[in-house]
Image (spheres, rainbow, N blue to C red):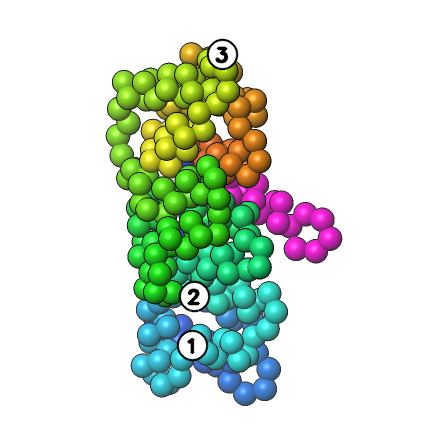
Amino acid sequence: MSPEPTVRPCTALNPNADAVILRAAMKGFGTDEKKIIQIVTTRANFQRQAIHQAYFTQFRRDLIRDFKSELSGNFKNVVLGLMMEPEKFSSKQLNKALVRLWTDKDTLIEILCSRTGEEMKKISSAYDEMYNKLLANHVATETSGDFRELLTRICSNERANSGQVNAQQAVADAHLLYEAGENRLGTDEKVFTKLFAQSSFEHLRVVFEEYQKISGNTIEKALKHEISGVLKKALDTIVEVARSPPTYFARRLFKSMGGNGT
């Protein structure tokens, strides 16, 4: 499956005109939510930033502040999220997950285990800027064991950037995983955490293909036998993203809309 975005840049963008529409949608009695949806869901993120600036230039008002004042509930949360730069939105969600009484490990896994090396560099930088602390250090204080090692490696920007895969290295790494797990008594989790945190998703995809040739088992089946707990959940997420990012996020969306309420 080839990832194709559903929100593409507007080819005839006019930030000033969009700003006028948004101001009219929130001016006076009531709010025209349909007009807001029409604008924020059909513009790419960088275009929303241009609209934000145009809104201030024309009306000397902060668009985000007006959204906070005029909108409510989940609709407000979605609109405000769409108006944030992706790395800042991710940083905000990570901070919320870390400062809770009980660390929200599911959020940490969903964000940190699904981002490319390039994306993690932006998130780490944004987190430092927004909260005046290193993301890796904050994660380390709120997690433990091999799970902590995996996440702190990811937060320390160890994941390789996307690029061409070295086939020979992929075969060697597949053997490394096999020898650290299925082909020995006990499991060397550190081999798994290091490789899963440092390799690009493209590289891991080839590693998993080679692993099945060596072992006869899929990497998913190997993890089921060799790893447990929250570490397994994190590694499973990395496997799923490496195989197909769109499929991973589609499943997350489907799960979020199941049950009683969304």
Amino acid type shown at disc 1: Leu
Report helix, strand or loop for mark 3. loop
Tell me the CA gap for discs 1 and 3: 56 Å
Tag 2 residue: 83
Which percent across, then down, holds residue 148?
Answer: 45, 43
Quarter placement of the N terminus? top left
Mark nearer the N terminus (2 vs 3): 2
- The answer to whether residue 86 shows anywhere in this view is no
Q: Are marks 2 and 1 in contact (CB under 8 Å)?
A: yes
Reply yes or no: does residue 250 show up in magenta: yes
- Above or below — where is 258 with respect to 11? above
> Which residue lies at the image location 64% right of the left edge and 50% below the top edge?
257
Amino acid type shown at disc 2: Met
Dot 1: few (<14), some (14–19), or many (≥20) neighbours within 10 Å? many
Q: Which mark is residue 63?
A: 1
- The answer to whether residue 64 shows anywhere in this view is yes
Task: State which region is magenta.
Answer: 246-262
Tag 3 residue: 216
